[in-house]
Amino acid sequence: MLARLRRLVGLSTSNPVTAPAVAPASPAPAYGAWTPDAAWIARRRAAGATYADLDAAAVARICAAAPAKASAVVGAAERAIRHEFELLGSGPFVPVDPDRPATRAYQPIDWYLDPVRRLRFPRGVHHKAWNLYEMRPGNADVKYPWELARCQHWVTLGQAYRLTGDDRFAAEIAAQLDDFVTANPVGIGINWTCTMDVGLRAVSWVVALDLVRGSAA
């Protein structure tokens, strides 16, 4: 999954960045009374993780201090596994892709659906050829598929994995990654037509993958 994601967001694994042997001549920005040095930078780069992380003890303290909130996160992640979404006042809906059959226990998501008007946007259109007013079906609102394709629920799945250690949540992220790429090849379809949404999706993917990087799934 990590290799797939790196290819999609344009990161290179063949030429990793290495830390400088010595601290840069220009002064580094101060973090309170502490300034990171070259050794700290090297450790961060070698960790393969984002700058914000919590160890197992911290996660346990969160569960003990806020059990209701932790339970709410896990409940939301369970709904994400069932592909039950509620976006922009839509009410609950389950977007089932009519073009792709279920495989094993996974039902492909319809990434092109306006759940309020029950209309689907066309697939297979290159982002450079896209024209909303000419190509949208009826009065369908493109903000609904865009919102779903931001994949912000992946972070919830990642949080649930960290709170419970249950690999199902990590496996769902991997399954949805394959699902999304199959339905939305890079540059093809409405979910590549808004650069802001592409950027927000990249953030969701990076944060979610960081949360589940320790999962065997």
Image: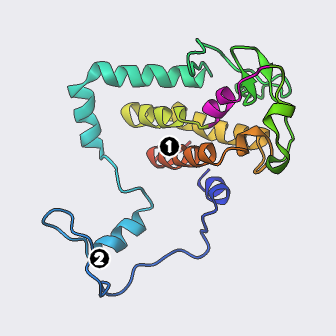
Helix, strand or loop for the magenta stretch, by majority: helix
Query: Marks 2 and 1, Cα distance to the nearest angstrom?
Result: 27 Å
Horizontal relation, residue 119 to residue 162: left or right: right
Task: Say whether marks 2 and 1 touch (CB < 8 Å).
Answer: no
Q: Amino acid at mark 2?
A: Ala
Residue under numbered circle 1: 208
Q: Is residue 175 above or below residue 34?
A: above
Q: Secondary structure at mark 2?
A: helix
- What residue do we see at 74% from left, 14% from top? 117
Q: Earlier in the sequence, mark 2 or mark 1?
A: 2
Q: Residue 194 falls in which quadrant of the image?
A: top right
Relative horizontal placement of residue 201, taking residue 50 as reference (left or right): right
| Residue 122 visible to the viewer | no
Q: Is residue 194 left or right of residue 209?
A: right
Asked whether 114 or 171 is in front, the reply is: 114
- For the residue pair 20 and 129, the one nearer the viewer reads as 129
The structure residue drawn at horizontal position 22% and vertical position 27%, both measured from the top left corner, is 64
Q: Which residue is mark 2?
A: 39
Callout 1: few (<14), some (14-19), or many (20+) C-alpha neighbours within 10 Å?
many
Q: Few, some or many C-alpha atoms within 10 Å of disc 2 (few <14, some 14-19, many ≥20)?
A: some
**Three-letter amino acid code of the residue under disc 1:** Ala
Colour scheme of the rendered structure = rainbow
- Front residue of this view, candidates 68 and 34: 34
Vertically, is 150 above or below 116? below
Segment tinted magenta in the rendering: 139-149
Q: Residue 22: x percent and y percent?
A: 31, 87
Single out the residue that lies furthest toward the top.
Answer: 91
Q: Label for residue 154? A: none
What secondary structure is found at the residue carrying circle 1? helix
Residue 93 visible here:
yes
